[in-house]
Amino acid sequence: MKKIGLALGGGAVRGLAHIGVLKVFQKHNIPIDFIVGTSMGAAIGGLVAAGIDIEKIEKFVLETPSYRILEIGIPNRGIFAGNKIFTILDELFKQNGLNEIQIEDLPIPYQAVSVDLNKGELFVFTKGNLSLAIRATTSMPAIFSPVSYQDKVLVDGGVLNNLPADLARKAGVDIVVAVDVERGYEEREPRSLFEVVYRSYTLMTREVRRSRLRHADIVIRPEVGHIAALDTTKAKECIDAGERAAEKKIKELKSLLNL
């Protein structure tokens, strides 16, 4: 059978739409042979690559209060300290007997995209601690503190590659499915400091994201553009949007797979 690689893009809370997409893949028995992700895409993809059932991931996300995820404080280099993400992920791994799991030991080959501020270049986790990789790739500049790793200072991979379909293609899979959860530009005034930062960030990365899509055979676009990046009250809405968008593409995907 042809091998499928998933490229899961970043999008903060909108990235929870990846859960809905993966639920549909499971429902239709679509195999996943490789996952690469940035930011929230890497977080959800990493959990799936570790073998955690997507229904468990959905339940965990919907039942975890937002205040446990966003630790408000006065860190040195970000509005949110960010280490709560690491702690909560470790909790989920331990619940499933996967604490201290290494990327090279995952059931599904996996990569997480981050950016090294010291060298100004991409750093892709292909081995090492999965929780740490997810913590690094979700460290959006000015919002979450960066991660120190070896001689690197790592932030959200979306700075240079927010939808890594090119990396999925390089992995040698036959079919690349990209899930794009970013919003288009909207003509209205930002409503908060966080929205100012995040909208500026997405504008800077928009053209790079679009260029990566040429590497995908199928692009799934959940309708989540109207949802604010950090609006955790819309988690279920994002998941449902992911399901609807994936269902629309299943027939096309099965055709490519000759199913």
Image (spheres, rainbow, N blue to C red):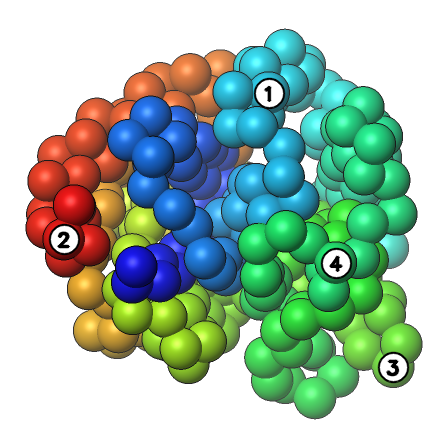
Residue to which mark 1 is pinned: 56
Q: In percent of the image, x 49 and y 15: which residue is there?
A: 233
Q: Is residue 25 above or below residue 182?
A: above
Disc nearer the start of the sequence (1/4): 1
Residue to which mark 4 is pinned: 105
Disc nearer the start of the sequence (2/1): 1
The Cα atoms of the two marked residues, 2 and 1, are separated by 30 Å
Residue to which mark 3 is pinned: 151
Q: Can see residue 226? A: no
Q: Quadrant of residue 188?
A: top left
Tell me the amino acid under the disc marked 3.
Asp
Q: In percent of the image, x 26 and y 74: which residue is there?
A: 215
Q: In the shown orientation, is residue 10 left or right of residue 88?
A: left
Disc nearer the start of the sequence (3/1): 1
Q: Is residue 139 above or below residue 222?
A: below
Q: Position of residue 194 (x, y in %)?
A: 54, 40
Circle 2 Cα neighbour tier, 10 Å, few/some/many (<14 / 14–19 / ≥20):
few
Tell me the amino acid under the disc marked 4.
Asp
Residue to which mark 2 is pinned: 258
